Amino acid sequence: MRRTFTSSFHGRGSGCDVGLCLAVCAALLAAFACSAPTPRTPPSTRSPANEAVPATAESIAISPVASPAQLARYERAAAYSAKHSGRVLLIARGSSVVYAAGQNGHPVDEPHPLYSASESFWGLLGVAADADGLLDLDEPVSRTIPEFGADPLKREVRLRQLLNFTSGLERGVQDLRRDEVSNLYERSLQLDMVSEAGARFRYGSGQLYVFAAVLSRKLEGRYDDPLAYLEERILEPIGLEVAGWERDGDGNPDVAYGARLAASEWAKWGMLLRDRGSFTGSEVIPADAVDAVFRGSADAPDYGLTLWLNRSETAGKRFYGGGLPGLAFAAGVGNQRLYVIPSLDLVVVRFGDGNRHWSDDAFLSLLVTDPPTTAAAPQ
């Protein structure tokens, strides 16, 4: 399969996008401006600013509002990230970034592949399309893809099941990654059913390509592809600039693996999720529609619509055992992470280079809990 990597915002210049730009000296200073990439920074260098700037759709502010205790927690989490092959750690509270660290020689504003965390864009777009009347998440795929109607098992597959990975389709990872596959969307329609629709959770990118095939057909004549719709419907209203998006041989956006963006940009997506479809106080997607992203299925209560949830019938399956109501995250190969923590008004972006000893539970424990105090020595 021939792969291409292209800018997601067609027709725009190739200069630096308006966004988070950090100049690094002895300590990092923050600014929002179009400029050349910043120099590489030493591991775990943090970036508080001198004053808070309100966030807008074009930028996220850097704010020094972290208390000494919070900053100590962030530093401990950053040290853990750096030790486990981290590249960038960025923490936002409210609409401001309160901590940003370039790690192991990587600048904090360097765009980074999300890999499989690219999936997290499409569940939210799906509920937006449902709210807009473009589709009904509970409609059968066969309404748009007639080929599915000829198979008694595929006939029962609903769009929602493609986004929560309970469609019954085979994973398709190996078949879809072969070099001779030039069109991911069309090839995914040939995947076999391995269980009844809705019966079992089976994580696999093939289901997301089927959703993209459905969306492409529904958008014919209005948008070039699903990415163009994502841009106009959500990304542009919140000022989220994607540095690039990988495409298959026929030019279709790779919805499951293709996104590349800076940490400050991905944080905007986290804010939209955390604030139930609003961004800096303005509604982008109705809140009741966004709530569907955070609802798991009967077979997988810990997975919503392309988003992992810290919720399970078995506590041992949770990726963090310390509570935090509403905690959710997007995960990509190499330990790319977007944590959404509504109870603490936090969004956390972490880029990494893969480390088998990485633990979400250990990282989050350092991030949100104080270290045990040492008892005073007897007098």
Image: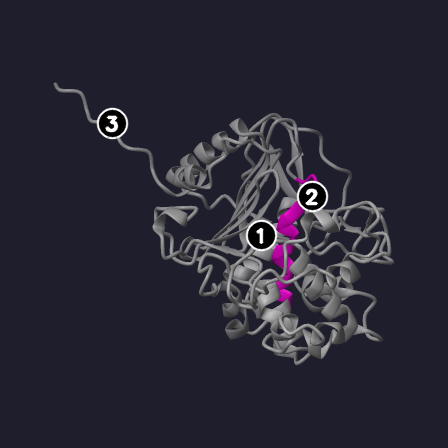
The earlier-in-sequence mark between 3 and 1 is 1
Q: Please state which of the two labelled residues, at mark 1 or mark 2, is closer to the viewer.
A: 2
- Which residue in the protein does label 3 denote? 374
Secondary element at tag 3: loop
Residue 218, disc: none
Distance Cα–Cα, label 3 vs label 1: 38 Å
Tell me: 3 left or right of 237. right
Distance Cα–Cα, label 1 vs label 2: 28 Å
Tell me: 86 left or right of 176. left
- Which residue in the protein does label 1 denote? 53
Residue 145 image point, x, y percent = 74, 73
Residue 66 image point, x, y percent = 44, 43
**Residue type at the position of mark 1:** Val
Q: Which residues are magenta?
A: 109-125
Residue 113, disc: 2
Q: Going 68% across and 49% down the picture, which residue do you hit?
A: 173
**Residue type at the position of mark 3:** Thr
Residue 185 image point, x, y percent = 77, 61
The one nearer the camera, 256 or 244, is 256
